[in-house]
């Protein structure tokens, strides 16, 4: 599974560095290091007023913040891993 976090200007100012850290922590906590490729990307063209843009398996999600990160990770990443048998 590939997760790309936008690190372009707008997302950088909205805290993409913290979102990267949260992904790293959650991936390690759930033992997904071998199943997930985490990378940065430049603008996905879906800038939002709040939060960071994340691309998960070619689907774009906007507005990811430290406050809603756990919900996003559980609802999207973990479910997708389960569906793939990871």
Image (cartoon, rainbow, N blue to C red):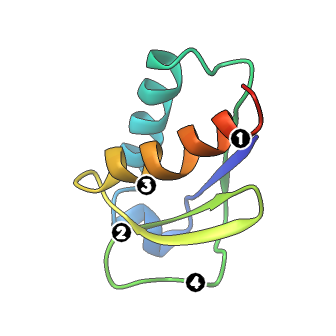
Q: Crowdedness of circle 3 by 10 Å Cα count: few (<14), some, many (20+)?
A: many
Q: Residue at x 64, y 84 (%)?
A: 45
Task: Residue 38: tell me if it is visible.
Answer: no
Q: Crowdedness of circle 1 by 10 Å Cα count: few (<14), some, many (20+)?
A: few
> At numbered mark 4, what does the secondary structure look like: helix, strand or loop?
loop
Q: Which is in the foreground here, disc 2 or disc 3? A: 2
> At numbered mark 1, what does the secondary structure look like: helix, strand or loop?
helix
> At numbered mark 3, what does the secondary structure look like: helix, strand or loop?
helix
Q: Decide: marks 1, 3 in contact (CB < 8 A)?
A: no
Q: Crowdedness of circle 4 by 10 Å Cα count: few (<14), some, many (20+)?
A: few
Q: Earlier in the sequence, mark 2 or mark 3?
A: 3
Residue 83, numbered label: 1
Q: Decide: marks 4, 1 in contact (CB < 8 A)?
A: no
Residue corresponding to mark 3: 16
Residue 51, numbered label: 2
Q: Position of residue 74 (x, y in %)?
A: 43, 43
65 sits to left or right of 55: left
Residue corresponding to mark 4: 46
Q: Earlier in the sequence, mark 1 or mark 3?
A: 3
Q: Earlier in the sequence, mark 2 or mark 4?
A: 4
Label 1 to label 2, Cα distance in Å? 27 Å
């Amino acid at each position: 599974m590939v997760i790309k976090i936008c690190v372009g200007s707008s997302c950088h100012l909205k805290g993409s560095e913290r979102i990267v850290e949260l992904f790293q922590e959650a991936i390690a906590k759930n033992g997904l290091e071998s199943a997930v490729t985490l990378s940065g990307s430049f603008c996905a063209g879906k800038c939002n007023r709040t939060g960071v843009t994340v691309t998960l398996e070619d689907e774009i999600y906007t507005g990811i913040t430290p406050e809603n990160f756990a919900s996003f990770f559980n609802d999207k990443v973990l479910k997708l891993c389960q569906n793939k048998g990871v």
